[in-house]
Every structure is written in structure tokens, then in C-alpha cells.
């Protein structure tokens, strides 16, 4: 079993839709979680960092962590074509963090 | 302004010919990481430095080495590149007390 699992997609949504991206993890030692956005042939860009269960909001993005079920989510409101990218979740402790394989998202105009 | 800079963006090397990829950072972060990412896969950690302390992942091949001469710079050396080493190589940095990792734009390595 991989430590962090994600549905690879692709996920296609119309512009303006609410997008829900999800990950599950197996390592109970994970203390923090991150979401990255990666455009084709570019490095990952940090979107959200959360340290505890609950919700964290930043603009159109909301990250949600449920440590009891080992489930993390990223919601994107009012999705735009520029949101089309691969979204990677990661969980970690100390300097060790593990990525999921990423979900490829396409937002269609 | 770019905070984690990788050079070159694209590198073509011959099978078996040593190659070095470089990474520099302006963030003064303690920790620097090297990842390998193949198409449609998660980035895979090769090793990381905590200051000068080198931490190698157990499954990183011996063909991959790294140097960190100072806080700002880190190098990835591939001693004898094989066709299977063609990938995107990503450098990242983080603070020791707050592990939010910031990535460079990557170097795409092609082995011919």
C-alpha cells in the first residue's frame, strides 16, 4: 500500500464549477499536509499547508484534513481554465514528506 | 523573483557520460531536497541535506550523488546516466522548523 493515494484522473469540469480533489494516507505519523499545483513541465507550486484537522481557506482554495479517517481534500471554488494542472497532495513529519501521484484537472471554458 | 533556481532547465547527456545539475536558493533555508519525477508519477525523493548533514534514501541508486558546498547551492551528480534516468529533476528547500517545501522549476534530463 502506498503511503499517499490519489485518483490520477483526469478530472474534467466546466468553468465555474466547484472542484473536489481528494487523498488518503496510511501513515499515522504524518503531522502536516500540503497541496501543490504543477503545470506541465514546471516545478510544483505550494498552494496550501495545514498542520491539523479542520479547514483552511485561502482565496478560492480550501484545504480540509480529517486525521481520524486519514483523508485530505482540496476544494477549488469558481474554477478557472488557468486552474488546469496536476494537483499533488503530500503528507509528512519532520523533514520527511511523501507525495501522492497527483490528480490531473482540466477546467473547460 | 525566483527563490529556488535550477540550471539548466533542459539537459541532454550521452549514455554513461557524467552530468551535474545545479540548484541555488535565496531563501536561506536549512534543508535542500532532490527529487526525481517521471511522467505522470509522484516526485520521488532521492536525498536531502539538513544543513551539511546528508540523508540518502534507502532506494536511491549509488549512481546518484550530491554535494552541498554552502547553504545556497546544492548539486546532483549522476555518474553514469542510463536511459532510465531520463526524468525531471526537482530541487526543493524548506526551513528546519516549518516544512513548507518550495520547488524550483526543475531540470528535464534527456539521455541519448
Image (tube, grey):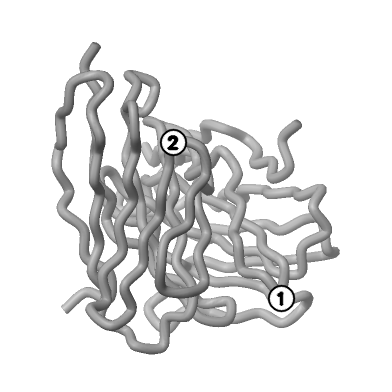
Residue A89, percent from left and from top: 36, 57
Question: Mark 2, mark 1: which one is toward the viewer?
Answer: 2
Q: Chain of mark 1?
A: B
Reply above or below: B67 against A31: above
Task: Give the camera-side residue of A63 and B18.
Answer: A63
**Residues behind callouts 2 and 1 on a single chain:** no
Label 1: element kind: loop
Total numbered labels placed on residues in the image: 2
Quadrant (top left, top right, bottom left, bottom right) of the C terminus of chain B? top left
Q: Is residue B13 above or below residue B22?
A: above
The numbered disc on residue B54 is none
Question: How far apart, in angstroms, are the residues tagged by discs 2 and 1?
Answer: 28 Å
Q: Describe residue B52's horizontal placement relative to residue B78 as left or right.
A: right
Q: Is residue A59 left or right of residue A3?
A: right
Task: Kindly indicate the quadrant of the structure image that contains residue B42.
Answer: bottom left
Q: Residue at x 75, y 48 (%)?
A: B24
Identify the residue shown where x is 66% and y is 79%. Answer: B54
Contact? badges 2 and 1 (CB < 8 Å): no
Q: Which residue is mark 2?
A: A60
Residue at the location (56% across, 38% down)?
B105
> Residue B79 at what x, y percent from top left?
53, 61
Q: Is residue A6 visible?
A: yes
- Taking depth in this image into account, of B4 and B7 the one nearest to the observer is B4
Tell me: B48 left or right of B71: left
Query: In this rendering, is residue B65 above or below A42?
Result: below
Residue behind mark 1: B97
Quadrant for residue B109, please give it.
top left
Label 2: state its secondary structure.
loop
Residue at image x 60%, y 71%? Answer: B48
Amino acid at each position: 500500500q502506498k503511503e499517499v493515494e490519489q485518483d490520477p484522473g483526469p478530472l474534467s469540469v466546466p468553468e465555474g464549477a466547484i472542484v473536489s480533489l481528494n487523498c488518503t494516507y496510511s501513515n499515522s505519523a504524518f503531522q502536516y499536509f500540503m497541496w501543490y499545483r504543477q503545470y506541465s513541465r514546471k516545478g510544483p507550486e505550494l498552494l496550501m499547508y495545514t498542520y491539523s484537522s479542520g479547514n483552511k481557506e485561502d482565496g478560492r482554495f480550501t484545504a480540509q484534513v480529517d486525521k481520524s479517517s486519514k483523508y485530505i481534500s482540496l476544494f477549488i471554488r469558481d474554477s478557472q481554465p488557468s486552474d488546469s494542472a496536476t494537483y499533488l497532495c503530500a503528507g509528512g513529519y519532520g523533514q520527511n514528506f511523501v507525495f501522492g501521484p497527483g490528480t490531473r484537472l482540466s477546467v473547460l471554458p | 523573483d525566483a527563490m529556488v533556481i535550477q540550471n539548466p532547465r533542459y539537459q541532454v547527456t550521452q549514455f554513461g557520460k557524467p552530468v551535474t545539475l545545479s540548484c541555488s536558493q535565496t531563501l536561506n533555508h536549512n534543508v535542500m531536497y532532490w527529487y526525481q519525477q517521471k511522467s505522470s508519477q509522484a516526485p520521488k525523493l532521492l536525498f536531502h541535506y539538513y544543513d551539511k548533514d546528508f540523508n540518502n534514501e534507502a532506494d536511491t541508486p549509488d549512481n546518484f550523488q550530491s554535494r552541498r558546498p554552502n547553504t545556497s547551492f546544492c548539486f546532483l551528480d549522476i555518474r553514469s546516466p542510463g536511459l532510465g534516468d531520463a526524468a525531471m529533476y526537482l530541487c526543493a528547500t524548506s526551513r528546519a522548523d516549518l516544512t513548507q517545501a518550495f520547488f524550483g522549476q526543475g531540470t528535464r534530463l534527456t539521455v541519448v
